[in-house]
């Protein structure tokens, strides 16, 4: 049984944002850190993987759809992203030990946490690494998505949509910590703490100029300056994100 868990998600290769979150007192003091996928597909994919693994047994890594896709591309598998320069470049950065790490990474895991009991950690949903559910998805959609979970799992922690939220679904608590590297809704690297039966949603504010400059200085991605300006300086709003993702949740 773990006493406190810091939950990070969707770092997307933005190493400077990860570094700032790791020194947050609540994160640094947590007994365990669980990262719910999409560590890669970004300007510093192997830097993020190496930093996370440097944490040793304190960290549990869950594989996200972006991690799976980069792994597949690195093995010469066509996943329909040949026209995405970031995916092609990111896959080429993976060394054999990174491939082995991603291959061995679970798509979901259940951990007993004080005050919560068994908690299921996954990337998108417990049954699919790219399925979309949102804070305003209808109850019937949520019930269907969670239908295969054991009755004793009353808390589900996910990521994927980059928007932080908590909500109840038929007595089950859903937690999405939001994104470290590519937040939607508002600026800042988002994370969450599970402790004593309560969820605390955290946000680390980062000066946009500092974040862009640090990413540009630390990445070999061709065109990284333009990518950083477009993706890091002005996050999409929650309204924009919900309108974009909404059709994928069956509404």
Image (cartoon, helix red, strand yellow):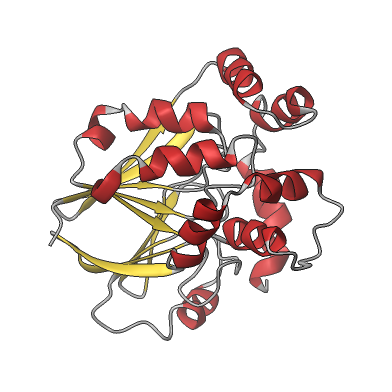
Between 131 and 83, the residue placed more toward the observer is 83
The answer to whether residue 199 is seen in the rendering is no
Q: Looking at the image, which is closer to me, 59 or 77?
A: 77
Visible residue check, residue 176: yes
In the image, farthest residue toward the front: 96
* Quadrant in the rendering for residue 138: bottom right
Against 10, residue 138 (above or below) is below
Which image quadrant is residue 75 in? bottom right
Where residue 151 sits in the image (x, y, percent)?
27, 84
Q: Residue at x 71, y 60 (%)?
A: 73
The residue depicted at 68 percent of the width and 58 percent of the height is 74
Residue sitting nearer the eye, 60 or 204: 60
Position in image of residue 226 (x %, y %) = 78, 25
User: Is 73 above or below relative to 42?
Assistant: below
Q: How many numbered tags mark residues here?
A: 0
Which residue: 42% across, 67% down?
Answer: 106
From the viewer's perspective, is residue 180 above or below residue 219?
below
Left or right, 63 with respect to 12, comes to: left
Q: Quadrant of the N terminus?
A: bottom left
How far from the left and from the top, in percent, is residue 65? 60, 62
For this orientation, the residue located farthest to the right is 83
Residue 235 is left or right of residue 230, and the answer is: left
Q: Position of residue 245 (x, y in %)?
A: 68, 58
- Quarter placement of the C terminus: bottom right
Quarter of the image holding residue 233? top right
């Amino acid at each position: 049984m773990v006493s406190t868990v810091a939950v990070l998600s969707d770092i997307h290769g933005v190493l400077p944002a990860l570094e700032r979150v790791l020194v947050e007192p609540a994160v640094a003091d947590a007994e365990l850190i669980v990262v719910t996928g999409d560590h890669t597909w970004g300007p510093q994919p192997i830097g993020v993987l190496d930093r996370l693994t440097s944490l040793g047994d304190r960290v549990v890594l869950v594989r996200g759809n972006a991690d799976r896709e980069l792994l597949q591309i690195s093995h010469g598998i066509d996943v329909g992203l040949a026209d995405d320069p970031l995916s092609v470049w990111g896959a080429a950065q993976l060394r054999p030990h990174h491939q082995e790490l991603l291959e061995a990474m679970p798509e979901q895991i259940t951990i007993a946490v004080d005050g919560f009991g068994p908690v299921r950690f996954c990337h998108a949903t417990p049954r699919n690494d790219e399925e979309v559910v949102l804070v305003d998805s209808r109850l019937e959609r949520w019930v269907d998505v969670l239908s295969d979970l054991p009755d004793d799992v009353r808390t589900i922690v996910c990521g994927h949509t980059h928007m932080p939220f908590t909500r109840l679904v038929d007595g089950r608590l859903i937690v999405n910590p939001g994104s470290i590297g590519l937040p939607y809704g508002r600026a800042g690297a988002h994370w969450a703490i599970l402790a004593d039966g309560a969820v605390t949603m955290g946000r680390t504010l980062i000066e946009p100029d500092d974040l862009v400059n640090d990413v540009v200085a630390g990445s070999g991605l061709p065109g990284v300056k333009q990518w950083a300006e477009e993706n890091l300086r002005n996050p999409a709003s929650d309204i924009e994100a919900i309108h974009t993702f909404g059709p994928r949740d069956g509404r």
